[in-house]
Amino acid sequence: MPKLFKCASRVALCGMFALTLSVWVRSYPTKNSVPALFLLGLVLVTYCSGRITGLLTALVGELIFATFLFPPYGSLAIAKAEDQVALVSFAVASLVVVRVSPIPQKDQPVVDRDG
């Protein structure tokens, strides 16, 4: 499977997950914690696919959360200050997660420490 297709499919899958979460929990008072939950998936995507895919996933998640999780819905504008803080915190945390997530080296030999 081509690398670009893998990247696009993982970003799209995470985008659908973010959209589903946004629509389901937008009426709950704990909706500000949804982006933090999304960070767990971002760690996995970055580990499996690399930093570029992680950055694209974070960007897609940011746009979806701004559009569908925080009012006014359907717009990138955010009305409440605490929602703006939650979204900016997610953006900063996602950049940190993508930067510090371990990326496995595929050509590294396995070292046997027992023998």
Image: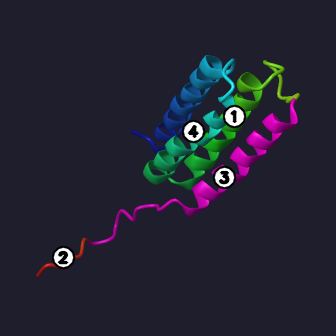
Mark 1 → mark 4, Cα distance in angstroms: 11 Å
For residue 113, what is the image quadrant?
bottom left
Which label is found at residue 38?
A: 4
Contact check, label 1 and label 3, Cβ < 8 Å: no
Badge 4 marks a residue whose secondary structure is helix
Instruction: Return the residue at label 1.
Output: 32
Which segment is the magenta one? 80-109
Above or below, comparing residue 12 to residue 115 in the picture: above
**Residue shown at 64% from the left, 58% from the top:** 96
Q: Earlier in the sequence, mark 4 or mark 2?
A: 4
Above or below, comparing residue 111 to residue 47 in the picture: below
Nearer the camera: disc 1 or disc 4? 1
Q: Earlier in the sequence, mark 1 or mark 4?
A: 1
Amino acid, disc 4: Phe
Q: Position of residue 80 (x, y in %)?
A: 86, 31
> Mainly helix, strand or loop, the magenta region?
helix
Instruction: Return the residue at label 2.
Output: 112
Mark 4 → mark 2, Cα distance in angstroms: 36 Å
Other-residue count near label 4 (Cα within 10 Å), few / some / many at <14 / 14–19 / ≥20: many
The answer to if 76 sits in the magenta stretch is no
Which label is found at residue 62?
A: none
